Image (cartoon, rainbow, N blue to C red):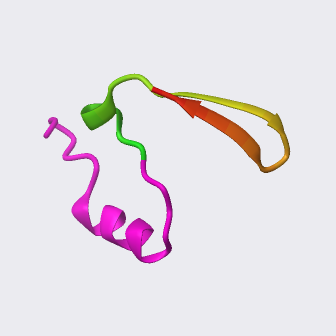
Amino acid sequence: DNKYGHPHKEILDELNQFGAKVLRTDLLGAIIMKCVKMNACEINR
């Protein structure tokens, strides 16, 4: 938890309903996303 209350549980629930992959820096630390082509991204943590 932080002083802003992010991420909001309601938003996380909604993203999960849509099958979105949620990467949280509060749980995973730094996240690096490199996109080389349209719809082709590499995610490192």
21 relative to 28, above or below: below
Quadrant of the rendered structure where residue 4 is?
A: top left
Picture residue at 48% right of the left edge, 56% below the top: 21
Quadrant where the C terminus is found in the figure? top left
Viewer-side residue, 4 vs 18: 18
Give the magenta part as a residue range. Answer: 1-22
Relative to 33, 3 lies left or right? left
Residue 34 percent across, percent down from the top left: 69, 28
Which residue of the protein is positioned furthest toward the bottom in this rendering?
17
User: In the displayed structure, does residue 26 sit left or right of residue 30?
Assistant: left
Could you tell me how many numbered marks the image carries?
A: 0
Residue at 32 percent of width and 32 percent of height: 28
Residue 42 falls inside the magenta stretch: no
Give the side of residue 25 with respect to residue 22, left or right: left
> If the image is split into quadrants, where does the N terminus sit?
top left
Residue 8 within the segment the image draws in magenta: yes
- The x, y position of residue 20, in whole percent, is 50, 63
Q: Write the residue at 26% across / 46% down.
A: 6
Horizontal and vertical percent for residue 35? 75, 34
- Residue at coordinates 33% horizontally, 62% vertically from top-left? 12
